[in-house]
Image (cartoon, helix red, strand yellow):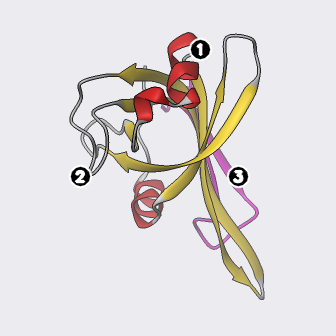
Amino acid sequence: MALTFGSTELDYLSSQRIGRLATVDAHSAPQNNPVGYWIDRNTHRIDIGGYNLGRSRKFRNVRSNPHVCLVVDDLASVDPWRVRGVEIRGTAEALEDTEPPTGGMSPEVIRITPLWIGSWGLTDDSFAMHVRRATDPAA
């Protein structure tokens, strides 16, 4: 069962353009890359595209191990110190011959289905962590 983002999380994710995608290869070696992403507002799935994405290590990693984590965060203020962000853990599909999220990208997409969402700093209480899992009754 996939999770959907709350309105505050969706607004924040829509205001940012770059996140960091963590994947693990077939030999359990981790990799973390900056990526551009797009949210399907109907399904709340996340698409990651890129130039030559199908030839990338992250694409191959998703094929061998679908468990991923995407973190989108920023520093909202240094005085006072305020960080904010969203962490999304889920399963990913390495799709070929797919319409890329935007022009100039190859026809491969990594599509993430959220199963765990954590967010912080999106409201006035920047130190509070809000977490939901797909197995939670409220999810």
Q: Which residues are magenta?
A: 116-139
Helix, strand, or loop for circle 1?
A: loop
Residue 139 is situated, as x and y percent measured from the top left of the image, at: 48, 31
The residue labelled by disc 3 is 129
Relative to 17, is 109 on the left or the right? left
Question: Is residue 131 one of those drawn in magenta?
Answer: yes
Q: Residue at x 41, y 28 (%)?
A: 54
Q: Is residue 123 above or below residue 9?
A: below
Label 2 to label 3: alpha-carbon separation: 36 Å
In which quarter of the view is residue 87 placed? top right
Residue 86 is situated, as x and y percent measured from the top left of the image, at: 59, 51
How many neighbours does mark 2 have within 10 angstroms: few (below 14), some (14-19), or many (20 or more)?
A: few
In which quarter of the view is residue 4 placed? top left
Along the viewing direction, whichever of 61 and 14 lies nearer the viewer: 61
As drawn, which residue projects farthest toward the bottom? 79
Helix, strand, or loop for circle 2?
A: loop
Given the image, on which type of amino acid does mark 2 rest?
A: Gly
The residue labelled by disc 1 is 65
The residue labelled by disc 2 is 103
Upstream in the sequence, badge 3 or badge 1?
1
Given the image, on which type of amino acid does mark 1 rest?
A: Asn
In which quarter of the view is residue 32 placed? top right
Label 3 to label 1: alpha-carbon separation: 27 Å
Question: Is residue 94 one of those drawn in magenta?
Answer: no
